[in-house]
Amino acid sequence: MIEAVIFDMDGLMLDTERLYFQAWDYAGEKIGIGKAGNMNWKCLGVTDEAAEKIWKQTYGDDFDFPRFLSYAREFFADYFTHHPVPAKKGLRELLEYLKQANIPMAVASSSARNLVLSHLDSVGVRDFFSVIVCGDMVEHSKPEPDIYLKAASLLHKDPAVCAALEDSRNGLWSAYCAGCQPVMVPDLWQPDEETAAILANKADCLSDLIPWFSEQISVIY
């Protein structure tokens, strides 16, 4: 049974993951390595600190990741000056359903806290969450279980009764290793056979999960 729900942010609640490809293309060209968006496939769901290690494994220990990241942030600052933060289909419907069902909700995002709060405020959903855990609040990045263990602890729930909604391999394995119930709503990546085997459920969009949740929880109107 489900007693709490923990949400990833980028690619799950917000249609922002594909913007990282554009931002990293832009940053790569700025520092002279050419379009580098494809590196995002290796870094889906991880913190900046973990991403830096992946970049240095590819481009060498001398790679200036902070400079690269500054250009990526420049891209995002300009983009969100001219465009709203895009919410994923079915987000508000699912949040409203879970709120009506008295199910506590948390965010477990690898992004930095200031960015997470800003984006949640931009789409008007921050108040749905009693707990927000970000990548700069835990020692180890996804796919390590730290962020889901912390979110469950702050919710005062056993991880086993927490559904963890994710779109990336790193996020799903983080949730699974923490003992949560991994639920996938695919964005840019479809699960491999190994990852599909650990899923408690999979849906095309967030609101499609409502019938499943209705079987897992006791709704209190």
Image (cartoon, grey):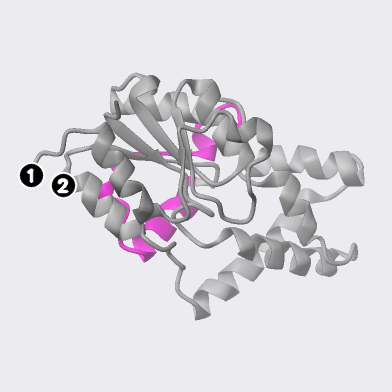
Regarding residue 98, the answer to whether it shows in the image is yes
Write the start and end of the magenta stretch as one range: 113-141
Regarding residue 130, the answer to whether it shows in the image is no
Q: Horizontally, is 103 left or right of 123 in the view?
A: left
Q: Horizontally, is 189 left or right of 182 in the view?
A: right
Q: Label 1 crowding class (10 Å Cα cut-off): few <14, some 14-19, many 20+?
A: few
**Mark 1 / mark 2, whichever is N-terminal:** 2
* Element assignment for label 2: helix
Expressed as whole percent of the image width and height from the top left, the position of residue 80 reads 52, 72
Residue kind at label 1, given as amino acid type: Tyr
Residue for point 23% across, 33% down: 217
Contact between marks 1 and 2 (CB within 8 A): the answer is: yes
Q: Is residue 67 magenta?
A: no
Residue kind at label 2, given as amino acid type: Gln
Q: Quadrant of residue 30?
A: bottom right
Q: Quadrant of residue 144?
A: top right
Q: CA distance from mark 1 to mark 2?
A: 6 Å
Expressed as whole percent of the image width and height from the top left, the position of residue 221 reads 7, 44
Q: Is residue 175 above or below residue 106?
A: above
Q: Which residue is mark 1?
A: 221
Residue 100: give its label. Answer: 2
Name the one closer to the observer, 193 or 87.
193
Residue for point 88% across, 44% down: 58
Residue for point 59% across, 35% down: 196
